[in-house]
Image: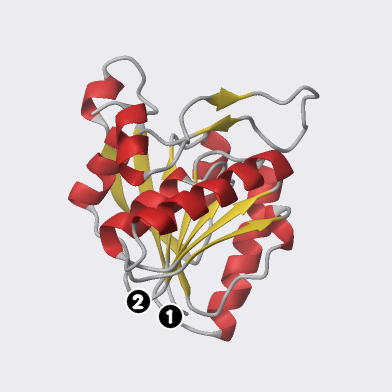
Amino acid sequence: MDERAMDKNLHIKTAGVREWVHQLAHYNRYEATPYDGMDYLFDQHAVLKSGSFIDFGCGKGRVPFYVHSLFSVDTIGIEMSSVLFQDAMNNLLDYRQAFPKKKGMISFECMLAERFVIPSDAATFYFFNPFSVEVFRSVIRNIVSSLESSPRDAEVILYYPTTAYKLFLQSHPLFEKIAEIPITHLQIHDNNELFLVYAYKQP
């Protein structure tokens, strides 16, 4: 099923790419995770259901909606662009109208990722290269602080991971890589088409 057909099934509009008129030093363009990529991920790795799922740089909200539709867990999308945030909110209205009885909360916050206060129940943290490794380090630091304050199982999922992201988590004493999930039909053209999952190691 193509991107727009899956959008239609979910009653949302998330296809396309959005470039910034003025290049931002630490924040990247909008491009949604492919649906078939998420199919590969969740066929081989079950999302943690004991806490909420947070997508940093969620754009129009594709990943939060898709995860919610599959698992009925609470999902939160963090987006710094007010334009993309409004698109996500419009999608939320249409999604909730189409699926009014679906369990689990979906919410979106318009703010810089490093300023977002990590909820004490957040368990899964998703990144599709939304910003520089400098911002990524700040967000991971906030995540660790929350996990130390409220100990719980947690994991970080990277899609199309950059070398900088991988090196940072590989050297982090509190995270361990537990899964590497290639999107095989896409890796024919690009070896970076994969997901990496890192579990939090409670001290």
Residue furthest to the front: 97
Q: Mark 1: few, some, or many residues within 10 Å (few <14, many ≥20)?
A: some
Q: Nearer the viewer, residue 140 or 112?
A: 112
Which labelled disc corresponds to residue 108? none
Q: Mark 2: few, some, or many residues within 10 Å (few <14, many ≥20)?
A: some
Identify the residue at image location x=37%, y=46%.
196
Q: Nearer the viewer, residue 2 or 42?
A: 2
Identify the residue at image location x=53%, y=77%.
147
The residue that disc 1 covers is 152
The residue that disc 2 covers is 50
Q: Nearer the viewer, mark 1 or mark 2?
A: 2
Query: Where is 117 relative to 170, above or below?
Result: below
Q: Nearer the viewer, residue 79 or 173?
A: 79
Identify the residue at image location x=53%, y=85%.
150
Q: Position of residue 113 (x, y in %)?
A: 67, 54
Please name the amino acid that badge 1 sits on: Arg
Disc 1 and disc 2 in contact, CB within 8 angstroms? yes
Sequence-first tag of 1 and 2: 2
Query: Where is 185 relative to 132, above or below?
Result: above
Applied colour scheme = secondary structure
Q: Position of residue 200 (x, y in %)?
A: 43, 68
